[in-house]
Image (tube, rainbow, N blue to C red):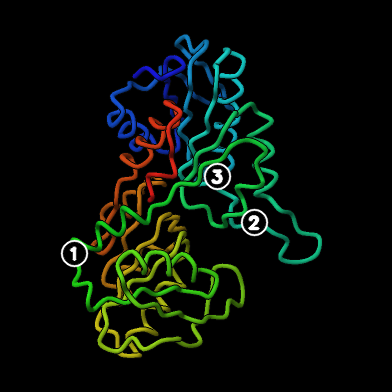
Amino acid sequence: MATNNGVIKLVAGNSNPALSGAIAAHLGVPLTKAVVRRFADMEIFVEIQENVRGSDVFVIQSTSFPTNDHLMELLIIIDALRRASGRRITAVIPYFGYARQDRKPGPRTPISAKLVANLITTAGANRVMTLDLHAGQIQGFFDIPTDNLYASPMMVRDIRERFDLDKLMVISPDVGGVARARGLGKRINAPLAIVDKRRERPGESEVMSVIGDVKGRTCILVDDIIDSGGTIVNAADALLEKGATSVYAYITHGVLSGGAVARLAKSRLKELVITDSIQPTEAVATAPNIRILSTAPLIGEAIGRTANEESVSSLFD
């Protein structure tokens, strides 16, 4: 694929090779030959094995588990491309790790999302592309252009194909996610309810009450990240106790750490729908109540538009 300003190159890290390959197939562009390997002491070494001088280069790398390894891979790949005279380097980060550390929750704590943004910029990235940031203000942590893509249009298409919209209710699993849930609800003309919860400690949550009448409704929980699964499982129980007929969840980033998959399999949640922004583990891929949507068409289209200096925001109009 040629752009308005030269040749497009796609470079993949090790975090999500399946997604990188699918994006390349969507664009009809082969992945650039590169070596990303470890020395005996686990230092990361990168070698770009094709000429990228003057190219518009897109580095595809989620900073998912193991987060620090994949972040360092991203930084070193960007540095290698900068030193190889890439014309423009875009860090395509489908899942932006450390995004939950976007503010100081207490005294003497870091704002790690800002630190990571600084590292990516210093490494030599000219722009960033990501998907459903945990907090929109993280875009302002970067001193370079940043495109935050949204998974909601692809989720809306899936919901329209599978549900009777007249019986749906969109649910925010906490007060902080109301704007996200309301936005999806408007697209399918569905009412909104909120699960009010109190989180005692990280990774644990206690559902307190449901704000809204969910009786007789098919409920769809909407969020950006699912980690331990505790919030979603508790929310599903609370909604069913309030008379909901069934509960589904549409969540962009399936972190699903620890025993999350087993917890979800035993829960009363009918189905969890996530995207492939994080490479699914075997347990996730084979779970009976987890389904995965591909983000390759969305990200591929955004990369193509960026390379051709076309509007990305119009993807979501």
Mark 3 and mark 2: span between their CA atoms?
Answer: 14 Å
Residue at the spot of label 1: 162
Distance (Cα) linking label 1 and label 2: 35 Å
- Residue 270 spot, x, y in % from top left: 26, 72
Q: Secondary structure at mark 2?
A: loop
Amino acid type of the residue that numbered disc 1 sits on in the rendered structure: Arg
Q: Residues within 10 Å of mark 2 (few under 14, many from 20)?
A: some
Of the numbered discs 3 and 1, the one sitting upstream in the chain is 3
Residue 110, compared with residue 180, is above or below; it is above
- Amino acid type, callout 3: Thr
The answer to which of marks 1 and 2 sits earlier in the sequence is 2
The residue carrying pointer 1 sits among few (fewer than 14), some (14 to 19) or many (20 or more) residues within 10 Å by Cα, namely few
- Badge 3 vs badge 2, beta-carbon distance below 8 Å: no
**Residue hosting label 2:** 101
For the residues carrying marks 3 and 2, which lies nearer the camera in this image? 2
- Residue 244: x and y in percent read 29, 85
- Seen from the viewer's position, the closer of residues 3 and 271 is 3
Q: Which residue is mark 3?
A: 67
Q: Residue at x 48, y 20 (%)?
A: 56
Image location of residue 261, percent across then percent down: 36, 62
Could you tell me which residue is drawn at 20 percent across and 69 percent down? 163
Determine whether, in the image, residue 245 is placed left or right of residue 71: left
Which of the 4 quarters of the picture holds residue 157? bottom left
Front in this rendered view, residue 307 or 119: 307
Q: Is residue 21 left or right of residue 253?
A: left
Q: Could you tell me which residue is drawn at 46 percent across and 58 percent down?
A: 257
Q: Secondary structure at mark 3?
A: helix
